[in-house]
Image (cartoon, rainbow, N blue to C red):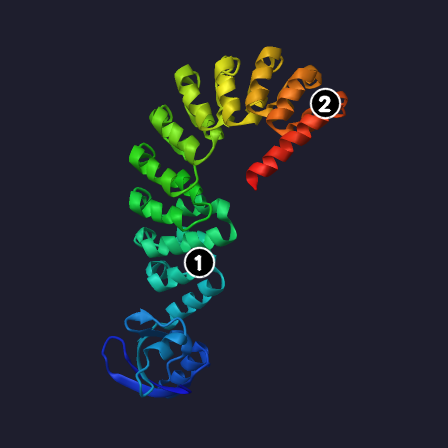
Amino acid sequence: MKDVAIHVSGGLSGEHLCCVTWQVGVGLDELRQAIAGEICIPPGEQRLLIGGKDLKATSDLVALATDEGVVSVQLLRRSPEQATALAAVSKDGKALGEVAEEFRAVREVVLAAVSKNGYALQYASEELRADPVVVLTALRQVGRWDPGKVGNAFAYAAYELRADADFVLKAIRQSAAGEEILASVAEDLLADRNFLLKVMYQTRWSTLHYAAKALRADGELVLTAIWKHDGYALKHATWELRSDRAFAFSAVRQDGRALGQLAEHLRADREIVLAAVKEDGYALMWADQTVRADRDFVLRAVKLRGRALQHAAVELQNDREIVLAAVRQDGCAHRYASEEMYVDPAVCQAAQEAMARAVRRSA
C-alpha cells in the first residue's frame, strides 16, 4: 500500500471536513500540514483521533485502512491557547507549572507534560493526579531516567491512588526501583500484612523497612522477607524479635547472613552460630570474637563449611588440624590458610584432592 485516503471529520459534529492523500512513510507533522492546507486549522490546533483514541503513530493509519486504502480520522480543534500550552509542555514537562490553571486540568496537556518529565505530576489538577494512566505515565518516565526517585514522583499522586493496594502493586511492577514507591504509599497499606506479603512475593524486596512496627515484629513476615530478599532484611525487624533465640534459629537457617543482624548475645551463642555457618560458611564473620577464637568450635564449623576458615581467628588459620579439616571439606578454603599452612605439603595435597572430588561431582 503506497497511498492512503484519509477522510477527516469533525470529532464532535461528525461533519465531513476534508479528504487528504497520505503517502505511507510520511510523518504525522506532514499529515497535519496537509490537513491545514485543506481546512485552514493550524497543525498545533489539530487533535487527531482514530477509533476514539489519539493518533500517535502513522502505522495506525496503515493498520486500520480498508482494503481500498481508506481510513477515517476525527479532528478536534484545540484553542490557540491550549495549543500553545501543549507545545510548551511537550518541550519541557515542568512548563506545566507555568501554564494557565485551566490547562493543568486538560488530560492531553498533562499527559504530554508527564511523558516529558514525570515530576510535572505535581502541577496537574487534583482530578488528574488521581488518574491512573497519568500517574503511571509519570512514574514510567522518572523510572526510565532516575529509578531511585520514583517514590518522590509517586508522592504527588492523589491519596486515593496511594491508598489503593492494587494500583500500588501495579506501579511497583512497572518500575525497576519500584520499592521506592512504598515510601509514599498511605500508612494504612504499610500496616496491611497481606499487602506487604504480595509485594514480597511479586518482587525481590524485603519491604520491611517501610512496614508498620507491629508487622516488623511478625516472625512469619520477617522470615518471608529473609527468604525473598536475604538475611540483611532482619535488620529492619524489631529488637525484641532479633533478641529471640527461637526465632534466631529460624532466621539463620533461612539465610546465614541473618546472624549479623541478631542481638549481640545471640552472636555469641555457639549453637546459633553453627546453624548459620551450616547455611553459609562465611556467616562466621558475624559471630562474636570469642566464638571465632574458640578452637573446638571453629574445628566443628570448618568441617561443615570449609570456607568458614576465612573468618576464624588468625592463630587458628595457622592451626594445622583446623586447616586440614577446612580444605578437606572445601578445597577453596586453602586460600584462607596462614602463609605457613598455605605451603604445607599435606594441606596442599588435601586441597587438591578436595577440588578434584568437586570437579568429578559436577561433571
Q: Quick check: can you spot residue 220?
A: yes
Mark 2 vs 1: CB contact within 8 A: no
Distance between mark 2 and mark 1 Cα atoms: 78 Å
In the picture, measured across the screen, residue 264 lies left or right of residue 237, that is right
User: Element at badge 1?
Assistant: loop
**Residue 157 x, y percent position in the rendering:** 36, 48
Count of picture labels? 2
Q: Would residue 244 be visible to someone looking at this image?
A: no
Task: Work out whether 280 lies above or below 178.
Answer: above
The residue pinned by badge 1 equals 98
Give the residue furthest to the left.
13
Image quadrant holding the C terminus, namely top right
Instruction: Name the residue located 30 percent from the left edge and 46 percent from the top edge.
Output: 166
Where residue 333 sits: x, y (%)? Answer: 64, 27
Other residues around mark 2 within 10 Å, as few (<14) / some (14–19) / many (≥20)? few
In the image, is residue 194 above or below residue 324? below
Q: Secondary structure at mark 2?
A: helix
Q: Residue 37's spot in the image, x, y percent?
A: 40, 87
Query: Mark 1 is on which residue type?
Result: Glu
Residue 106 sits in quarter: bottom left
Task: Say what amino acid the circle numbered 2 marks.
Answer: Ala
Indicate left or right for 283 with 217 as reference.
right
Image quadrant holding the N terminus, namely: bottom left
Q: Earlier in the sequence, mark 2 or mark 1?
A: 1
The structure residue drawn at horizontal position 40% and vertical position 75%, both measured from the top left corner, is 59
Which residue is at a point 39% across and 28% down the rendered structure image?
222
Viewer-side residue, 255 vs 110:
255
- Looking at this view, is 195 or 268 the one in front? 268
Which mark is in front, 2 or 1? 2
Q: Quadrant of residue 225?
A: top left
Q: Which residue is mark 2?
A: 346
